[in-house]
Amino acid sequence: MITGLFVFILYATIKTKSRSMDGYEPFKKWVGKTVVLQRETVLFEENNPRKGYPYFLTDSLHPEWQYAQDRKNLPEPELVEIVTFPAGTKLKIEKALQFTNGVSGSSYPTVFGIIHKEGKAYKINYQWGTMDIAKFFDHIEKCWQFHQAPWQDKADTAFYALPQAEWW
């Protein structure tokens, strides 16, 4: 009994948690909408794809752009480049989730959607948003900032408050 309780508590503590961000700014103005990509984006397939949304979308303004390039050029690539979408491509944004890693406690908001091109449907995920750690440690609620997403024509310089991901 005690062992089972210990295993349950350990699992609940270290598992990655998630929470819908659909009702929080800046996501709520985009979720459910079809947007037009303002610049070229690249679609990758990861070794361990997200369930239901196996493709990782990125662009040259994304903070992780160079990391993605490095991952695809490893001797045993972690990413495989699938297709490049030109500016003008449409993306239907379906939902946004905040994931919080149970071990490190780091969070990463992610937008999920679908791009149709040449008869194919690509279910994508796009990591969007970073926490300003200094603001967070100073207990400033609005500590999340969002780089210019490929569907935005200019950067949003505001900071936003987001809740932590939930246990279940």
Image (cartoon, grey):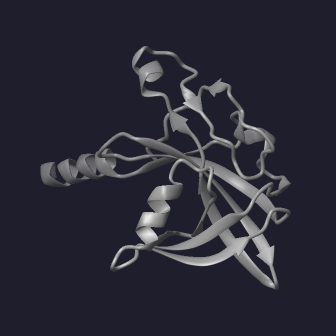
* Picture coordinates of residue 75, whole percent (x, y): 33, 79
Q: Residue at x 72, y 52 (%)?
A: 150
- Foreground residue, 77 or 101? 77
Q: Is residue 104 above or below residue 145?
A: below
Please tell me in which quadrant of the rendered image residue 89 appears: bottom right
Is residue 53 in view? no
Q: Is residue 14 above or below residue 37?
A: above
Q: Residue at x 45, y 72 (%)?
A: 72
- Foreground residue, 86 or 78? 86
Is 149 left or right of 88, judged from the image as shown? left
Is residue 94 in view? yes
Is 136 left or right of 142, judged from the image as shown? left
Q: How many marks?
A: 0
Q: Is residue 166 above or below residue 140?
A: below
Q: Residue at x 59, y 32 (%)?
A: 145
* Picture coordinates of residue 122, whole percent (x, y): 69, 74
* Picture coordinates of residue 165, whole percent (x, y): 49, 40
Q: Is residue 120 above or below residue 84?
A: below
Residue at the bottom extreme of this rendering: 119
Please tell me in which quadrant of the rendered image residue 29 appears: top right
Q: Residue at x 67, y 70 (%)?
A: 123
- Foreground residue, 44 or 67? 67
